[in-house]
Image (cartoon, rainbow, N blue to C red):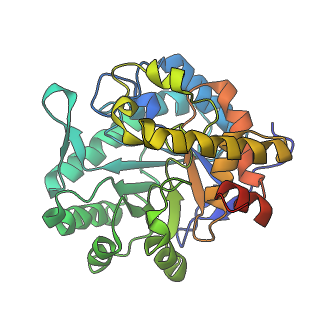
Amino acid sequence: MTETPLETTLLGKTGLDITRVGLGAWAIGGGGWEMGWGPQADDDSVATIHRALELGVNWIDTAAAYGFGHSEQVVGRALAGLPGDQRPYVFTKASLIEGPGRTIVHNLKRDSILREAEASLRRLGLDAIDLDQIHWPIPDEDIEEGWSAVAELEEQGLVRHIGVSNFSVEQLRRAQQIAPVETVQPQYSLIDRDVEAELLPLAEREAIGVIVYSPMASGLLSGAMTRSRIAQLPDDDWRTHDPRFQEPRLSHHLALVERLRAVADRHSTTPGAVAIAWALRNPAVDGAIVGFRRPDQVGPLLGAANLRLDDSDVATLEGRA
């Protein structure tokens, strides 16, 4: 167990008391699909989930799209047999379905959203999903139909809470005309800060729960990513095509990692934990999703939940010191 219990906070108005760091299950969906992370052993994934729960993490964020059901199957396997009081909250997402050649197809039609929920419940081994989210607001013209379907699932008791991911403020407002949006899930890190302008202030004002993804910029800010490691990423790792991992942006990002390392040294922690703590420092943010892939990664990064960065640390990280 961790020496200090993980800090928790209420997720908006949901009533869910979540640890400030949750386990993200994107990478454990494995490789061989459009947005995969390369090979991933299921036994490693299950052991990682168990390690995170042992250390106090109380929520997992997955999606039907991750490995087109494989991530949810692995999560279900890891949770099978756990006593009810030990089961974490399980969050998932819908609207991305499998297309030709293991590519992603966006679908917000009612029947598709309902089918996805049934399949997710079966794979996860649950009677109800704690938080169901629209994964992407695409196609834009179908947002109202998709959100109405998610609200219908909540009314039926198949999901307990509903939220959105990757929505703009304007798209969020449209959804709110149909049913309250309880949570939002945007990308947010030291190198992806667009949501600071409108979405996060809105969420804070209206007490909408916020869980952010990729606080380490998909591993780029973890401290373990180097030019040589990037060059050796598997062909089916989506990051090989991400401009953030390529020049001219890569040099800038690796310089940021050195600033993260300097702050980490002050706190006797890791650059990745500092990157996560920076995202959690925003008052609108309730929790951060961290994509652990091996049990040994969990402990060093969980320290972010209780890490307090001071103004000097933040100035260093943001290049103002």
On the rendered structure, is 175 left or right of 195?
left
Which one is in front, 302 or 148? 302
Q: Residue at x 33, y 30 (%)?
A: 67
**Residue 280 place in picture, x, y as percent:** 64, 59
Relative to the observer, which residue lies in front, 73 or 319?
319
- Counting from the top left corner in percent of width and height, residue 4 is at 84, 47
Residue appearing at x 60%, y 63% in the figure: 286
Q: Position of residue 181 (x, y in %)?
A: 39, 71
Choose between 188 and 184: the one closer to the eye.
188
Query: Where is 23 relative to 145, above or below?
Result: above
**Left or right placement of residue 150 versus residue 6 in this view:** left
Residue 232 vertical position relative to residue 188 in the rendered view, above or below: above
One can see residue 228 in this view = yes
Quadrant containing the C terminus in the rendered view? bottom right
Horizontal side, residue 178 vs residue 258: left or right: left
Task: In the rendered view, tell whether residue 59 sits above or below residue 55.
Answer: below
